[in-house]
Image (cartoon, rainbow, N blue to C red):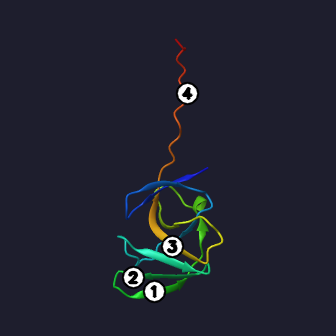
Amino acid sequence: MPISVLDLATGERSHRAHDTLTLDVPGDFPRAGGIFTVADGFRGSYTAMAGKQVIRHVTPRPLSWRIEGEMCLVARSSSGLRRLRQYRLCSIEPIVAAPPPSLAPAE
């Protein structure tokens, strides 16, 4: 089942696969327009709010482990074969159930 996310930089809503990779948001990560890049699946880098380049070890986790309303970094692509992956700051959107079929008799 796809999970709805909101890109906080662009305001764009999208539905992503449950196994899309995510990361926790570092405290010094810029909230507006920041890009977090991960090389080889575990070496993350970004430019902190103070302008300093930061490199750190990361552990990606699936989107399905996140909760509604949580802010996290979401991979731009769900392909597990990429050596270099970019992440964007997103919020997990509420799941909206489809309305039940009308019970009114057909005319």
Precedes in sequence: disc 1 or disc 4: 1
Q: Position of residue 42 (x, y in %)?
A: 60, 80
Give the residue pinned by disc 3.
86
Pointer 3 with pointer 2, Cβ within 8 A = no
Pointer 2 with pointer 1, Cβ within 8 A = yes
Question: Residue type at mark 2?
Answer: Ala
Q: Could you tell me which residue is drawn at 45 percent across and 86 percent down?
A: 54
Q: Secondary structure at mark 4?
A: loop
Q: Secondary structure at mark 3?
A: strand
Above or below — where is 91 with respect to 56? above
Q: Could you tell me which residue is drawn at 47 percent across and 72 percent down?
A: 25
Relative placement, left or right, of 27 versus 100 is left
Of badges 3 and 1, the one in the foreground is 3
Give the residue pinned by disc 4.
101
> Which numbered tag is attached to residue 48?
2
Q: CA distance from mark 1 to mark 4?
A: 52 Å
Answer few, some or many: residues within 10 Å of disc 4's Cα (few below 14, many 20 plus, some between 14 and 19).
few
Q: Could you tell me which residue is drawn at 50 percent across and 71 percent down?
A: 87
Depth order, front residue of 25/101: 101
Q: Secondary structure at mark 1?
A: strand
Give the residue pinned by disc 1.
54
Q: CA distance from mark 3 to mark 2?
A: 15 Å
Q: CA distance from mark 4 to mark 2?
A: 49 Å
Answer few, some or many: residues within 10 Å of disc 2's Cα (few below 14, many 20 plus, some between 14 and 19).
some
